[in-house]
Image: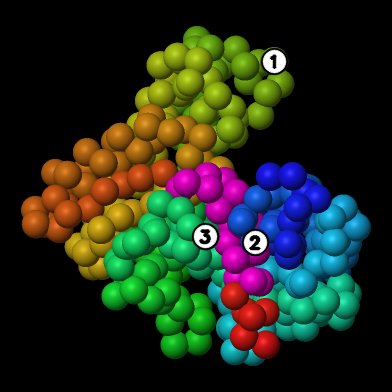
């Protein structure tokens, strides 16, 4: 897509637990310009300022006036009030985020949970297009969720539904960043791949992974995934462990929602079938037979861009209603 022929454009923002991804997006969902920075911040004001600076840069880079900004944020969003009710990974809980960003930017702002925006992109234009019942899992620092049921996006009574990363999968399990215990995202997220790598390192002190650690490389999900793709058996084992836990959560999702599709997005999908094949196998053998046979587990067509592109879709759709 050539920027000069873009008819209308908006800015989409994916504000996740680790990174902020901002893009100028046209009506055909072509990404004309993108910016990415860390979302780590000392406090809310620092993070708000960083996001505003990134959006301002994107607006300046746009080929024409921007109609508005859509933001998907890692947190529970009270959509009616425009307030972030809770955000385990970001210092934003309790803030009237939509209004604050609108004041800083001077353009219309639409806000939703990042799992919902990811699902919106995939449902309208990607892997879920044409499906009436589907579940989206955004597997990154944590796990976000999006649900389409009977042909409608499910947001819950206050806008905070589909927090699938916080369903309990382990009684008396490890403490989640939200304060609860035994939550899905602790065991099956991108961060969980890093933790599985640390356990693998301790169990295999003579491994290639141990050599990388000795060189000063941090054991993260990204490193473990990279080394697994290079054929390191210890790292493959770590990803299979997490993929198995991902599949166990998907069994509950399959049995509860009876979806046609479970679509997986977020940064952890860089692991590809190393992560998803163990999950598929668990669902095949452990979900209720008639339900497991009906569901396909697929990768998001928009990949790690789903949240940002979906935020742009949110902006286009909400601006049309204003």
Question: Whole-Å distance between the Cαs marked 3 and 2?
Answer: 12 Å
The residue at which mark 2 appears reads as: 27
Q: Vertical placement of 214 versus 253: above or below?
A: above
Q: Check disc 2: other Cα within 10 Å, few if <14, some if 14-19, many if 20+.
A: some
Residue on which the image places disc 3: 121
* Image quadrant where one finds the C terminus: bottom right
What residue lies at 59% left-to-right and 75% top-to-bottom?
317
**Tag nearer the camera, 1 or 2:** 2
* Position above or below: 60 against 231: below
Q: Which mark is residue 215?
A: 1
Instruction: Give the image location of residue 199, x and y in percent.
Output: 46, 31
Q: How many marks?
A: 3
Dot 1 lies on which element? loop
Depth check: give the residue in front, 124 or 200.
124
Residue name at image x 64 percent, y 80 percent = 320
Number of residues whose C-alpha sits closer than 10 Å to that of mark 3, classed few (under 14), some (14–19) or many (20 or more): many
State which region is magenta.
Answer: 300-316
Asked if the stretch drawn in magenta spans residue 305, the answer is yes
26 and 98: which one is in front?
Answer: 26
Tell me which numbered mark, 1 or 3, is placed earlier along the sequence: 3
Q: Is residue 74 visible?
A: no
Q: Report whether 136 appears left or right of 210.
A: left
Q: Which callout, 1 or 2, points at the residue further toward the start of the chain?
A: 2
Q: Residue 220: tell me if it is visible.
A: yes
Mark 3 and mark 2 lie on one chain; the one further toward the N terminus is 2
Q: Main secondary structure of the magenta part?
A: helix
Whether 209 is among the magenta residues is no
Secondary structure, mark 3, is: helix
Q: Quarter of the image for the N terminus: give it.
A: top right
Q: Position of residue 314 (x, y in %)?
A: 60, 71
Q: In the orientation shown, which residue stands out farthest toward the left?
A: 289
Residue 303, horizontal then vertical, whole percent: 52, 45
């Amino acid at each position: 897509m050539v920027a000069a022929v873009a008819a209308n454009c908006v800015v989409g923002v994916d504000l996740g637990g680790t990174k902020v991804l901002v893009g100028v997006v046209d009506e055909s969902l072509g990404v004309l310009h993108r910016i990415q920075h860390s979302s780590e911040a000392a406090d809310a004001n620092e993070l708000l300022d960083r996001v505003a600076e990134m959006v301002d840069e994107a607006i300046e880079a746009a080929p024409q006036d921007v109609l508005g900004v859509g933001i998907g944020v890692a947190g529970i969003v009270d959509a009616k009030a425009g307030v972030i009710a809770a955000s385990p990974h970001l210092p934003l809980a309790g803030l009237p985020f939509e209004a604050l960003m609108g004041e800083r930017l001077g353009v219309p702002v639409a806000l939703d949970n990042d799992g919902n925006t990811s699902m919106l992109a995939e449902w309208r234009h990607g892997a879920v297009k044409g499906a009436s019942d589907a579940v989206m899992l955004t597997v990154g620092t944590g796990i976000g969720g999006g649900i389409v049921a009977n042909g409608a996006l499910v947001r819950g009574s206050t806008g905070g539904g589909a927090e699938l990363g916080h369903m309990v999968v382990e009684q008396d399990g490890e403490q989640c960043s939200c304060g609860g215990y035994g939550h899905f995202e602790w065991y099956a997220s991108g961060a969980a791949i890093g933790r599985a790598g640390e356990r693998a390192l301790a169990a295999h002190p003579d491994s290639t992974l141990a050599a990388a650690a000795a060189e000063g490389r941090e054991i993260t999900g990204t490193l473990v995934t990279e080394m697994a793709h290079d054929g390191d058996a210890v790292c493959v084992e770590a990803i299979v462990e997490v993929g198995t836990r991902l599949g166990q959560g998907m069994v509950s999702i399959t049995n509860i929602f009876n979806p046609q599709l479970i679509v997986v997005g977020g940064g952890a999908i860089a692991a590809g079938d190393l992560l998803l094949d163990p999950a598929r196998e668990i669902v095949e053998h452990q979900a209720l037979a008639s339900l497991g046979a009906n569901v396909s587990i697929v990768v998001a067509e928009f990949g790690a861009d789903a949240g940002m592109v979906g935020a742009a879709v949110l902006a286009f759709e909400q601006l049309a209603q204003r």
